[in-house]
Image (cartoon, rainbow, N blue to C red):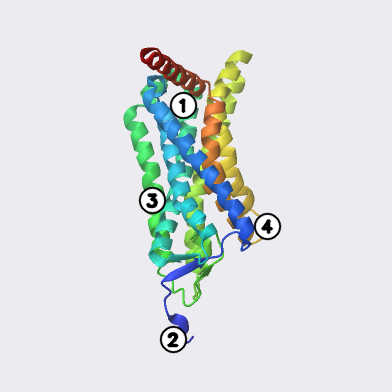
Amino acid sequence: MGTDNQTQVTEFILLGLTSDWNTQVSLFVLFLVTYLMTLTGNFLIVLLIRLDSRLHTPMYFFLTNLSLVDVSYATSIVPQMLVHFLAKHKVIPLLSCAAQLFFSLALGGIEFVLLAVMAYDRYVAVCDPLRYSAIMHGGLCARLAITSWVSGSVNSLMQTGITFQLPMCTNKFIDHISCELLAVVRLACVDTSSNEVAIMVSSIVLLMTPFCLVLLSYIRIISTILKIQSTEGRRKAFHTCASHLTVVVLCYGMTIFTYIQPHSGPSVLQEKLISVFYAIIMPMLNPMIYSLRNKEMKGAWQKLLGQFSGLTSKLAAHDS
């Protein structure tokens, strides 16, 4: 291979979703609105949990972490996408690309582990309710949350490090919406079999292992619920898990359905759609799911709106 081909690139060009200008403008408006909804919804959930003492429980502590992860994940990808929709030259510097890969990969891993932690919390709540407070104490909750953040970050640091040690040669076109792991690895002009093994191991550790823990938790939860004699009791027990189960099905279901295929792996288009789903759709849906399907959250919203309405009335009366 010639010397020119071994020259390390200092920037990349993201090909994105489309090259059609009108489509890019439409996507800019759509993704901007969705991103603003994501920021508003998740920050309102964090604020509501902070203000309402009835929500100071392990379940909502983990939900706060999930909201922060969702906002951070969307922010690691969406603003750069919005800029590139309107930019003529869709360039991203090498260091910015590495940073984006690190944060998106870390936050994605954190979310998968965090969902498994939340499944364990629901398992204890349903299967051992009398000892729930003793088991899910503040110290354990903090350690589980820290474990989620550390495991995702360490994995991402290793993956980012070994990925950007690869010689990218003169190939600087990334056929993706962001600096996604597989898309960057494909640019290498050397054998990447060791990277592919590392990615597979990472997927097993941070995707399949948490998924198996979630599956085991819900097998025990469903088994326990079916043993409850009263219909009302079964309904209440299932209601405590409904929001989390919905998020789990959406989050794990998309990835597993796409990657567990008889072929070698997902197509480039599928990879792009998966990234759009996790960066745009999921962070927006999570607040809606937990707000609309959760009695405690709806009650807290009503209380907060009532307080705000009362305060507004007092101010209006004072001004008059």
| Label 2 Cα neighbours within 10 Å, binned few <14 / some 14-19 / many ≥20 | few
The residue beneath circle 2 is 3
Marks 3 and 4 close (CB-CB < 8 Å): no
Q: Label 4 belongs to which residue?
A: 262
Q: Which residue is drawn at 47% across and 82% down?
A: 5
Q: Nearer the viewer, mark 3 or mark 4?
A: 3
Q: Kindly identify which residue carries mark 3.
A: 153
Left or right relative to 286: residue 263? right
Binning the other alpha carbons within 10 Å of mark 3 as few (below 14), some (14 to 19) or many (20 upward) gives many
Point out the frontmost of discs 2 and 4: 2
Q: Circle 1 — which element?
A: helix
Q: Which mark's residue is nearer the viewer, 1 or 3? A: 3
Q: How far apart are marks 3 and 2 (CA)?
A: 36 Å
- Which element carries disc 3, helix, strand or loop? helix
Eye-nearest disc, 3 or 2: 2
Counting from the top left corner in percent of width and height, residue 116 is at 48, 38
Farthest residue, direction left: 139
Q: Quarter-wise, where is residue 136 in the image?
A: top left
The residue identified by callout 1 is 124
Disc with the residue nearer the chain's start (2 vs 4): 2
Can I make out residue 221 in this image?
no
User: If you read the primary sequence from the N terminus, does the residue marked by circle 1 or circle 3 appear first?
Assistant: 1
Q: Earlier in the sequence, mark 3 or mark 4?
A: 3
Is residue 151 in view? Answer: yes
* Amino acid under disc 1: Val
**x 47%, y 36%: residue:** 40
Identify the element where label 4 is drawn: loop
Give whichever of discs 3 and 2 has the lower sequence position. Answer: 2
